[in-house]
Amino acid sequence: MIKTRKYWLITGLLVVLLFAAFYNGLVVKKYIINTNKLDADQSVRIVLISDLHNHVYGENQSKIISSIRKQSPDIIALTGDIADDEMPIEGTEQFLAGIQGIAPTYYVSGNHEYWSNDIQNIKNTIRQYDVTILENTYQQIKVNNSSIIIGGVDDPDIVKYEKPGFDWEGELYKAFLELQDKPDFKILLAHRPELIEIYKRSDFDLVLSGHAHGGQVRIPFILNGLYAPDQGWFPQYAGGEYKHDSLIHIVSRGVSFNPRLPRVFNPPEIVVVDIKGE
Ligand SMILES: [Fe+2]
């Protein structure tokens, strides 16, 4: 009798563990950043979506779109690999059509968009949905009563696929040099998290990235990611919040879903960042 009870208990625990490990529904991950660059009663909410890779969440992307809408963002940030080099672009177009009008939306490219060898067509498609494409550029925008700066950089694979000889690192530095004189809260969108040492040379308060897919396999409290592209095994920036002196770096685990590459304890995530004045 006791043996049977034990058997069912262990089986039950295993089932719960397996369910938790392979749960692949969208989750919302929230971060709060306090800053004296915004007035005490002011706040800005960013929804960050990364690495969609054309995956479709519900009919016409209804699931992901309603999750984003529910968060009432002031800004939507798309940090690359929204389209893919192997999958049809329809999923991306449904997604962009669905989020159109929710909030001003900003996009930077990722490596897979360059790998398509069709980057300009992809960017033109994205532009059609009122998305601002940031390519070593920035905008100073008013959100609620706060002025913030949002900049973005193309993926460094621009050098391999579009502009051979382009000094990606040097041009990035030059593009944002004048920001040093601006008192606003400054955000940079940059697909690859492992290049944080390069982004740090420019004067940003917050960097938003993706690309690492959460390190694919995680074990809560023990392992934050097993493997990530361009970082290899046990990646340092698999996903989460990282502090570099006054700079905060948030790395989304992304919303990619590939049945051949299961995500373990690593559900696709919609990231919500609240920047609050203090
Ligand atoms: Fe990527």
Image (tube, helix red, strand yellow):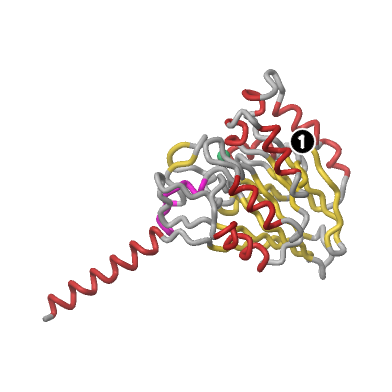
Q: Indicate whether residue 215 is drawn in magenta.
A: yes
Label 1 residue SS: loop
Write down the residue under mark 1.
Answer: 136
> Residue 61 lies in what quarter of the image?
bottom right
Within the image, what quadrant is residue 30 found in? bottom right
From the top left corner, tell me how far across and down residue 241 is, in percent. 60, 54
Tell me which image quadrant ligand 1 sits in: top right
The residue that appears at 73% across and 45% down in the rendered structure is: 188
- 132 sits to left or right of 54: right
User: Compared with residue 207, is residue 115 higher up or lower down, i.e. above or below?
Assistant: above
**Residue 194 occupies quadrant:** top right
Can the viewer see residue 34?
A: no
Q: Which kind of residue does numbered mark 1 sit on?
A: Asn
Q: Tell which of 254 and 101 is nearer to you.
A: 101
Look at the image and say whether residue 276 sits in the magenta stretch.
no
Residue furthest bottom as drawn: 1
Q: How many marks?
A: 1
Mark 1 surroundings: few (<14), some (14-19) or many (≥20) residues within 10 A:
many
Q: Which residue lies furthest to the top in this view?
A: 165
* Picture quarter with the N terminus: bottom left
At which x and y percent is residue 149?
Answer: 81, 49
Q: Indicate the position of residue 260 as horizontal and vertical percent values.
A: 39, 44
Q: Is residue 88 visible?
A: yes
- The location of residue 168, given as percent across then percent down, is 70, 27
Q: Which secondary structure class fits the magenta region best?
A: loop
On screen, 118 above or below 209? above
Q: In this view, does 120 lie to the left or right of 7?
A: right
Q: Give the range drawn in magenta.
A: 213-223
Q: Which image quadrant: the C terminus?
A: bottom right
